[in-house]
Amino acid sequence: MDDTQKFDDDEESKDRQFVNALARGLELLRCFRPGEPYLTNAELARRAGIPKATVSRLTHTLTKLGYLAYSERRGTYQLASGVLALGYALLSNMDVRQIARPAMEELAEYSQASVSIGARDRLNMVYIETCRSTANVTLRLDVGSRIPLATTAMGRALLCGLPQSERDYLMDHIRQKDEENWPRIKAGIEEAFRSYEERGFCVSAGEWQKDVHAVGVPLLGVEGERAMAFNCGGPAFLLPRERLEADIGPRLVALANKVKTDLGRA
């Protein structure tokens, strides 16, 4: 299942309030990825699973509205400033970024690693704030970066903090996306659940990328808000599992608790 594919096609097809044309237009905007700024109508049609004739009408409309820009020379589309304006409005209204940043900067410098907070987008986590240490070697992920839900500390931490029904729903789609590797992925997620219940954090040591270690903690929202999660991660040689479990993990739990208190959630 591609990241642009909707989870619940069947449910949406039965929903009379669901506007299919709007959904398809938004799916096209999701097709653009870091490092791939230019896409043709044919490429958009393939990625979104939408007929090319429909894509042509949608890209024309999105260009008129300022969400896409068309290059006559290239014959391609790219995201335009309208999308950026929406993203900026979202980030600027997230109080958690401003409240959490001082503590995130302090932990990043202490650990000589990176500390980030993210929210779920389908089967990925998207960074909404990140702080890097002054160390020469660290992760180079910025706001807007996407990492997998199933194999990263941040993603697993978010799963740990979700209600059982939502967690089961996501686990089922993670399985559908990668049936071949599901037994290994499931074992890692279940280990994360046990770690979270015992210590309040979970670890991913080389399971997303073999040379990256990280610890994650959920930031549970108030009713009506989206759940988020923190991570602290970096090169494996700087963050061995023993250090994550004995030192960085408890510090990240304390950071999340402080942010909850400052947000008035604790």
Image (tube, rainbow, N blue to C red):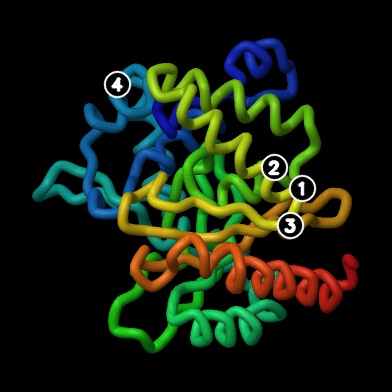
Q: Which residue is mark 2?
A: 194
**Between marks 4 and 2, how big is the CA–CA gap?**
47 Å
- CA gap, disc 3 to disc 1? 6 Å
Under tag 4, what secondary structure? helix
Q: Amino acid at mark 2?
A: Arg
Query: 3 or 247: nearer the eye?
Result: 247
Mark 4 or mark 2: which comes first in sequence?
4
| Quadrant hosting residue 104 | bottom right
The residue at which mark 1 appears reads as 197
Q: Position of residue 179 (x, y in %)?
A: 43, 17
CB atoms of marks 3 and 1 within 8 Å: no
What distance separates the C-alpha of mark 4 from that of mark 3? 48 Å
Q: Residues within 10 Å of mark 1 (few under 14, many from 20)?
A: few
Residue 35 higher or lower than 192, as above or below: below
Q: Position of residue 41 (x, y in %)?
A: 25, 32
The residue where tag 4 is placed is 52
35 vs 78, nearest the viewer: 35
Disc 4 marks a residue whose amino acid type is Lys
Q: Quadrant of the C terminus?
A: bottom right
Disc 1 marks a residue whose amino acid type is: Glu
Q: Secondary structure at mark 3?
A: loop
What x and y, as percent, mark residue 210?
32, 50
Can you say whether 122 is above or below 112 in the image? Answer: above
Q: Which residue is mark 3?
A: 200
Query: Does 230 sit above or below residue 202?
Result: below
Q: Are circles 2 and 1 on residues that touch, CB within 8 Å?
A: yes
